[in-house]
Amino acid sequence: MTARRTVVTGAGSGIGRAVARRLSHDGDEVLGIDVAEAALSETFAGLAGATWVAADVRSDECLGTVDAFGPYDVLVNAAGILRRHAFVDHPLDDWQQTLDVNVRAPFRLSRHFAAEHLSRGAAGVIVNVCSTESFVGVTGHAAYTASKAALLMLTRAFALELAPHGIRVVGVAPGVTETGMNADLRSRPEDAERLRGVIPLGRFARPEEIAAAVAFVASDEASYLVGTVVLADGGWHVY
């Protein structure tokens, strides 16, 4: 059986790293993309059949990188950034960067993936890493919340158009996960306790738990999931 070929953005750290490692362990031939080359080397240390390229997901270079990788079966848009600011003080540059990384880049990569697959009449899967904040707002996260809500609807819009061609578009929406994005908050006992207080499960997710959800929705066992965004947030959305 031929191994799937998979592209994972944001593979240098956090959820993207966990996804890249999980899919590699599952037998996929993975291309990891991230701006941090040293971090990519750490992600793929000891993993056979994986390659990585340092590139900005917003750039044309990133599109060229996936073209050079050749035809692939799965795209996981895991790259994302968070800039915390009070709404009235939110710098426009940080707003734009957040939207560019979290929405524009997945749009461009997904469109590129779809066009190539349509030209070959090939099936495929796109997985977008959304967020619980695709559904709820969080103070100080105006740009991030807006970007993740947009990514949720982009997932559904692409799914609607691409499903008739055998291309599934799905998402996973993590809650608070133990990554560098929120390490500062988790390191402060009061903030950590406040965050755990809105999670019925009472703890934060490990990146590997989110990667397991991504692996499932990208698998053939999830072949009838289209436009679905799976909440993996320990129950936070129940509130």
Image (cartoon, grey):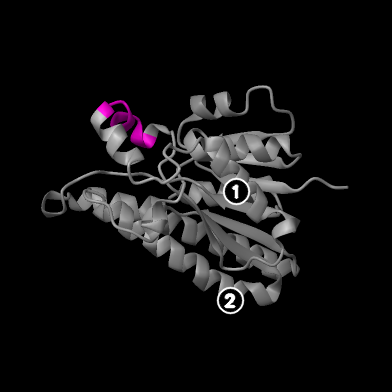
The residue wearing badge 1 is 213
Q: Along the polypeptide, which appears first: circle 1 or circle 2?
A: 2
What's the magenta region? 181-189
The residue wearing badge 2 is 161
Can you tell which quarter of the image residue 113 is in?
bottom right
Q: Give the structural element (helix, strand or loop) at label 1.
A: helix
Q: In the image, is 119 to the left or to the right of 235?
A: right
User: Which quadrant is home to the C terminus?
Assistant: bottom left
Camera sees residue 62: yes
Which residue is nearer to you in this view: 195 or 127?
Answer: 195
Question: Which numbered disc, 1 or 2, marks the residue closer to the eye?
Answer: 1
Q: Is residue 222 above or below residue 175?
A: below
Residue pictured at 43% horizontal, 34% vertical: 179
What's the mark number on residue 54? none
Q: Amino acid at mark 1?
A: Ala
Q: Examine the structure image and report whether residue 183 is included in the region drawn in magenta.
A: yes
| Number of residue marks | 2
Q: In the image, is 177 to the left or to the right of 119?
A: left
Camera sees residue 54: no
Q: Main secondary structure of the magenta part?
A: helix
Q: Amino acid at mark 2?
A: Glu
Label 2 crowding class (10 Å Cα cut-off): few <14, some 14-19, many 20+? few
Residue pictured at 24% horizontal, 43% vertical: 84
Q: Position of residue 23 (x, y in %)?
A: 67, 41
